[in-house]
């Protein structure tokens, strides 16, 4: 299983990547500082794309997390079928939380800092 972290914070990318690698969940973490770069990467994937988990930050310059999901929704089904998408944020804004919960592409809004035990439990469920 591959992980993709989409977050404009280099610190958050670094800490999440280290947590994921130490957890044993993956040996492969790809990071993107810009959501648009991640969309372009996903568009270039073929039918042999590995099972992938995306950890998507909510607040970013350029495309924010919600705008990313709009582009994500237009990706071919053979790509989306291989992806489990989680939003990750420290937001306490109720409207952001409700919007994330209502988004059909987002499995769950995870709190920052990333909690590996919670992520493992959600991956078993989904």
Image (cartoon, rainbow, N blue to C red):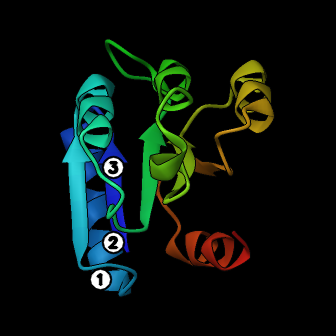
Q: Secondary structure at mark 1?
A: helix
Q: Position of residue 35 (x, y in %)?
A: 33, 28
Q: Is residue 120 visible?
A: yes
Instruction: Establish if 90 lies above or below 124.
Output: above
Q: Secondary structure at mark 2?
A: helix
Residue located at (77% from left, 37% from top): 101
Q: Secondary structure at mark 3?
A: strand
| In-front residue for pair 58/111 | 58
* Nearest to viewer (mark 1 / mark 3): 3
Residue located at (66% from left, 77% from top): 121
Q: Is residue 99 left or right of residue 1?
A: right
**Which of disc 2 and disc 3 is earlier in sequence?**
3
Q: Position of residue 118 (x, y in %)?
A: 63, 71
Gap in angstroms between the C-alphas marked 1 and 3: 15 Å
Residue of label 2:
19
Label 2 near label 1: C-beta < 8 Å? yes
Residue of label 3:
5
Residue of label 1:
22
């Amino acid at each position: 299983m591959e992980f993709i972290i989409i977050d404009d914070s280099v610190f958050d990318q670094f800490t999440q990547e280290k947590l994921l690698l130490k957890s044993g969940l993956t040996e492969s973490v790809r990071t993107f500082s810009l959501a648009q770069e991640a969309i372009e990467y996903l568009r270039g994937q073929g039918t042999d794309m590995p099972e992938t988990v995306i950890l998507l930050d909510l607040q970013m310059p350029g495309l924010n997390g919600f705008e990313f999901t709009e582009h994500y929704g237009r990706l071919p089904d053979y790509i989306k079928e291989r992806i489990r998408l989680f939003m990750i944020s420290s937001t306490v804004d109720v409207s952001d939380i409700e919007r994330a919960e209502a988004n059909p592409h987002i499995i769950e809004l995870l709190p920052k800092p990333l909690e590996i035990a919670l992520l493992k439990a959600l991956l078993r469920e989904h």
